Amino acid sequence: MSFRARRELLSQVAPRYAEARHGQKSVILDEFLASTGYARKYAIRLLRRPLPPSGPIRRPRVPRYGPAVREALRIAWSAVNGSVRSAWSRSCPSWSQRWSGTVIWSSRTTFARCS
C-alpha cells in the first residue's frame, strides 16, 4: 500500500476511531493494522492526533553553476582521480601529518598553515 493510500485510509478511519467506544476502537485498530502494516503504537498515535495539512512537495533546487564552472570542477576532480584526501596530502603536507579523527580544523586555518 502506498503512502498516499495509507493517508487516505487514515483520514477515513480516524473520525470513526475518535467516536468509537473502547471495544470498538480495538476492532477498528486491528483492521487498520491489517491493511497498513503499521506497528500498533504508531497506528494509535496516528489515529489519535489530527492529521497535519499536506503541503506541497519540496523539490531540490536547480543547480546555480553554469556549464563553465561545472566543466572546471569536472577537470579538477579528474586531476585528483576523485580522491580529495590524496590531493590535500600532496598540496598540504602539514595537513596529512596532522590528520586524525579527532583533529578539528577549518579551511581558513588549513590554508594559512599550507601557505
Image (spheres, grey):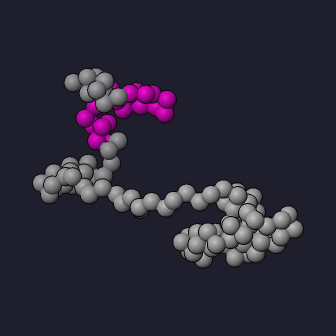
Which quadrant of the rendered structure holds the C terminus? top left
Q: Position of residue 11 (x, y in %)?
A: 61, 69
Is residue 10 shown left or right of residue 56?
A: right
Identity of the residue drawn at 14% across and 57% down:
67
Q: In the depicted view, which residue is nearer to us: 18 or 92?
A: 18
Asked if residue 61 lies left or right of residue 76, the reply is right
Q: Quadrant of residue 26?
A: bottom right
In the rendering, at what x and y percent does residue 70 appear? Answer: 19, 54
**Could you tell whether 69 is left or right of 60 in the image?**
left
Point out the residue furthest to the front here.
Answer: 19
In the rendered structure, the answer to whether residue 33 lies left or right of residue 4 reads right
Task: Residue at 69% x, 76% y: name it.
Answer: 35
Q: Which residues are magenta?
A: 86-105
Nearer the observer, 21 or 71: 21
Q: Quadrant of residue 7?
A: bottom right
Residue 99, percent from left and from top: 42, 31
Q: Is residue 28 visible?
A: yes
**Towards the viewer: 47 or 38:** 47
Q: Quadrant of the N terminus?
A: bottom right
Is residue 78 in sight in this rendering? Answer: no
Relative depth, front residue between 96 and 44: 44
At 12% across and 54% down in the image, what residue appears?
Answer: 68
| Residue at x-position 83% and y-position 70% | 24
